[in-house]
Image: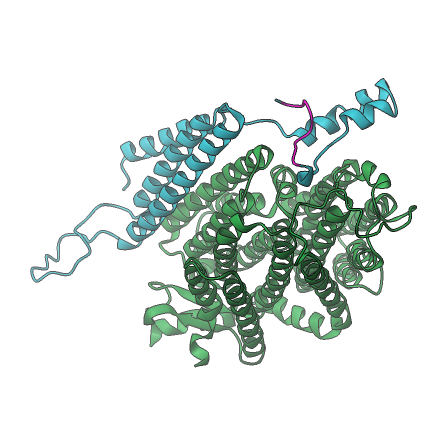
Amino acid sequence: MIDGTMALVVGGLFAIGFYLMLQRSLMRIVLGFILLGHGTNLLLLVAGGTPGRPPVPTGTTDASARTADPLPQAMALTAIVITFGLTAFLMALAYRSWRLSGHDEVHDDVEDRLIGTARERADAGPESGRDEAGPAPDRDDGGTAPGEAR
Amino acid sequence: MTGALPALPVLLPALGAGMSLLRLPRPVMRGLSIGVLTAVVACGTALLVLADRHGPQALHVGGWPAPLGITLVADRLSSLLLTVSALVALAVLLFAVGQGTAEDRRSSAVVFHPAYLVLVTGVSLAYLTGDLFNLFVAFEVMLAASYVLITLDADENRTRAGMTYTIVSLTSSLLFLSLVALVYAATGTVTLAQLGPRLAELPDGLRSALALLLLSVLGIKAAIVPLHFWLPDSYPTAPAPITAVFAALLTKVGVYALLRTQTLLFPRTGVWMVLACAAVLTMIVGILGALAQDDLNRLLSFTLVSHIGFMLFGIALFDVQGLTGTILYVVHHIVVQAALFLVVGLTVRRTGTAALHRMATRPRPGPLAVTLFVVPALSLSGIPPLSGFVAKLALLRAGVAQGTPAAYVLAGTALLTSLLTLSAMTRVWMAAFMGRPPGRPEERPGEPSGTGRDRRGGTRLMLAAAAGMTTTGVAVAVCAGPLAGLGERAAEDLLHPREYRSAVLEGSQR
């Protein structure tokens, strides 16, 4: 029997985590990921069933007491390590993004915007519009498309 | 000795990654990575032969029997895909080494080799693992390495794309972990071999919910429409070899996981309507997206999405012929998609731009690069006698043999998509390779500022790697007969997994 408190906590963590992940700010996304990770790890623990004695054989074995299921605990430990490492990576990436762009937001894709506005540009002028505002994904030329989506 | 063989494709790259973290001289590091991947190809081939002759090879790590310990299983399907994937990884590594020599980027080389080997570790583990939780771990290992690779030496644009990619993948991973927890709570095991019968005892609603959650998790990883949006956004920003290995391996591992789990955990008879709809959508939306693109790499990424739909086609049919088609298609697509991305990498290097409308004013790639583009491009569109034709023919025959309206709709969509793929490839051909004289090597406007000494040798190595991939693609078509036989036996295994189960679970009786 799983108690309702745990179910509520897991559900709450999932809800808050997903809400934060839907924000534009990178820091909130990282926080959302952390909460979501906690929720998932708790869910793994709850999946093990009711709590019980530690699954370590000792001299005084009490046959009446239930032993806790060690497998979900092992899985939760692995998952905690993985989410911890990835959180560190995500924060480093958010920091790098902040260093490079100067603010803490997720941008739209430049190419998507260009394709979305392709018709307007084509209407404006068949040749001139295309060459000036055309896609410039030349990584080797060292730049992103000019003046878009900043 | 053969008992430990399934562990080697996982252990060797992992140990190699550890070794390459030491400050080795560059030639030693390159030699180490190339040696390790060659060994993985050899192990994969040996496993394939063993699995085909003597049935699935199972290894209980540490001597713990199946439900308790970690089990690695190599059956026909996993060892076939392992071999092909390792071969592609090796070719892409050679290409990357060539590019590294040609462009002389010292800063990223220190991280590239360990991350690349960790990626191969994850891919191998995903193919070989025998339980759901280790599948999650394998995905994490693979994806963690891919996060590093996609943001290596990143500028602002690549950081943005890498961020999107990382967040989407992490979300799907957490959903996967939730799925593992729910499956464990419902059945008390995560071993794939045990899960089938135990899931069958669950109530229908719960079972469908778990199957759908699994489908959406793997759908994000395999880029099934409508869960594909992250892929064309992030893949094209990475350098050519990294895009090539991602396109060839990562989504295919998702498809493999879908193939493995759906056949083993949720066996069904008849067409699976949800997946059939997803397959039709994926094929159409992907290829229409490709036709709208101007950036060469994005165009290829959308065709990648579109052709994931072909693999779903076979899985949706859920019979031996359909699964055979899927297996052939996965093998063909791993090789061909990698070859295309490598050649496009060469072309973009030569012309200095990835935008199709600008290529007309840039020097044309040499005749060898043109040939190397044409063969995989025609193969992707399914022109006989190339490998794409063989795989598509297998799928279409499976669809017609089943003969239900859904199967006919799938087959029709597949034909239409092939035609549109040909149209997209023709567009690339006209823009990038036609209508102007080949430029001399001196006038390369977009050439990165590499030091001139090794550039020629590096470019040769890149060409050789791309040529190797294209030749492998042709070899897939030449060996179509034996390969189709192997694919059919693998599909039989998938639909009747008794051998697989007994190989995994026999340790528990011992």
Q: Residue at x 24, y 45 (%)?
A: A50
Q: Position of residue A140 (x, y in %)?
A: 67, 41
Q: Is A93 in front, or is B132?
A: A93
Q: Is residue A146 magenta?
A: yes
The answer, for residue B65, to whether it is visible in the render is: no
Magenta span has B315?
no
Please give left or right for residue B41 compared with residue B392 in the image: left
Q: Give the camera-side residue of B145 and B389.
A: B145
Picture quarter with the N terminus of chain B: bottom left
B325 over B430 or under it: above or below: below
Percent of width and height locating residue A145:
69, 29
Chain assigned cyan: A
Identify the image's colour scheme: rainbow, by chain, secondary structure or one colour.
Answer: by chain
- Point 75% across, 67% down: residue: B471
- Up-down relation of residue A119 to residue B346 (above or below): above
Q: Which residues are magenta?
A: A142-149
Residue A58 in the image, given as x and y percentages of width and height: 11, 60
| Chain B as rendered: colour | green
Where residue B82 appears, as percent x and y from the top left, is: 57, 65
